[in-house]
Image (spheres, rainbow, N blue to C red):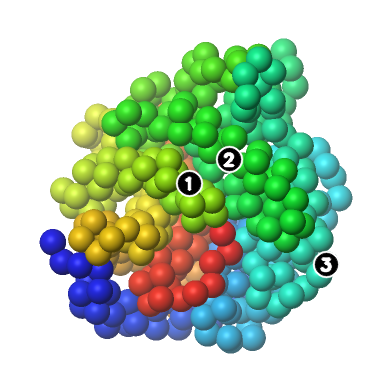
Amino acid sequence: MKNVETLLRENRAWAEETFRKIDTKFSAVTLRSRDKLPYGVNENGFHIDMTERRRPWWTNGFWGGLNWLLYAYTKNEEYKKTAKRSEELLRPVADEFGRLDHDVGFVWHLTFGADYMLTGDEAAKNLDLYMAASLASRFILATKVPGGFIRAWNGKRGTAWDNYDRSIIDCLMNLPLLYWASDVTDDDRFARFAKAHADVSLRDHLRADGSVNHIVDHDRETGALTGTQAGQGYAVGSSWSRGCSWAVYGFVLSYLHTKEERYLEGAKRAADYFVENVKSDWLPRVDFRAPAEPVLYDSTAGACAACGLIELAKILPENEGGKYLEAAVNLLRTMGEKFCNFDPANDHMLDYGTERYPADLSPEGLKKAGVHMSIIYGDFFYTEAVLKLLGAEFSPW
Ligand code: GLY
């Protein structure tokens, strides 16, 4: 097993060249998509604009976030202009409390939070703190035992959208907003909610083998798991790969903010499982326990997991970290070759993302479902991972 230093050195030229392609592409796309909140692309390869379709949506911070990542590394002012513009486009969503949900970290911390970290903009900091307060307000205290969790989604009791006692693995990625809020306000309540939620996630989302439950139902009095749901995976008890990647990176981030060993152990368990399930060809399937056919990929899972694997490699001793870095490099290089479109004429970069395991596997069903498409968070995490290989210091998390 090669050590971290050797692997970084050997892959430096690849990472530099790949970043050069990313920068060349996005310095064109950032101008074309300045007035959009992109999600996927249309048949001509141009971004679909969520400003028109669905402005309050969990992915609408990734475009601003990607531009802040690129600005932080290149100092190209055009990226900053686009990031600021995306904040203007998002801003009206903040005026309606009922449109905020558990994903305020993804949306606001990657945009306004990153803005504050990079420019010191006080108004951006304040808005992000409001979002932290709204996330903290979702905390459901288990009344009979210490602890609790952050409730997923919005909905009304007793209706089909009754999510009151439900938590999801994805929410680990919203916790950095709370850790950050504790840091900047010097008030540990936000971080205490974050840790309580991360602990429930360790207990109820992460399984013994390192795979995860996407959705968990809890007993409100004790917080205990009362049931699980397939969510975006193939079936109850299967293994949705993006959920696994949320666990890999999410537990690493909780470790980085708290230095609590149990989160590092959780991250390693999820990472070992993830690597075991992608190492045959380094192209992540949507669900690691779905039938082998049809072959359905989700590149976004690979890009997010790569970020967590690289961070693990930086945290762990050389001899242990090497295996995680090698896995991250294998994922990025293989997906770079097979799934990436670096042509500046198209808006999409990382293709073969998949929203969820499709219910209908007929050719028409697959066409309608969000299968094998580019999704903006795939581009965000792929770029973030390449920047990590290059030693970039800025992290919005
Ligand atoms: N957080 C929703 C998803 O990963 O699709």
Location of residue 9 with respect to 58 vertically, above or below? below
> Which residue is label 3 attached to?
123
> Which residue is label 2 attached to?
195
244 to the left or right of 30: left
Of residue 304 and residue 85, the one placed in the foreground of this image is 304
Residue type highlighted by circle 3 = Ala
Sequence-earlier tag: 3 or 1: 3
Give coordinates of residue 98: x percent, y percent: 80, 38
User: Do the CB atoms of the residues marked 3 and 1 lie less than 8 Å apart?
Assistant: no
385 to the left or right of 32: left
Sequence-earlier tag: 2 or 1: 2
User: Do the CB atoms of the residues marked 2 and 1 lie less than 8 Å apart?
Assistant: yes
Of residue 51 and residue 282, the one placed in the foreground of this image is 282
Could you classify mark 1 by the number of other residues whose Cα lies within 10 Å: few (under 14), some (14-19), or many (20 or more)? few
Location of residue 213 with respect to 27 vertically, above or below? above
Residue 142 visible (yes or no):
yes
Q: Give the farthest residue toward the left.
A: 1
Residue type highlighted by circle 1 = Glu
Of residue 157 and residue 9, the one placed in the foreground of this image is 9
Residue drawn at (20%, 60%), measured in percent from left and top? 319
Sequence-earlier tag: 2 or 3: 3
Residue 360: image tag: none
Residue drawn at (53%, 43%), measured in percent from left and top? 172
Report the mark closest to the observer, 2 or 1. 1
Secondary structure, mark 1, is loop
> Which residue is label 1 attached to?
260
Q: Give the farthest residue toward the right.
A: 95
Q: CA distance from mark 3 to mark 1?
A: 32 Å
Query: Where the N terminus falls, by quadrant?
Result: bottom left
Of residue 34 and residue 327, the one placed in the foreground of this image is 327
Q: CA distance from mark 2 to mark 1?
A: 9 Å
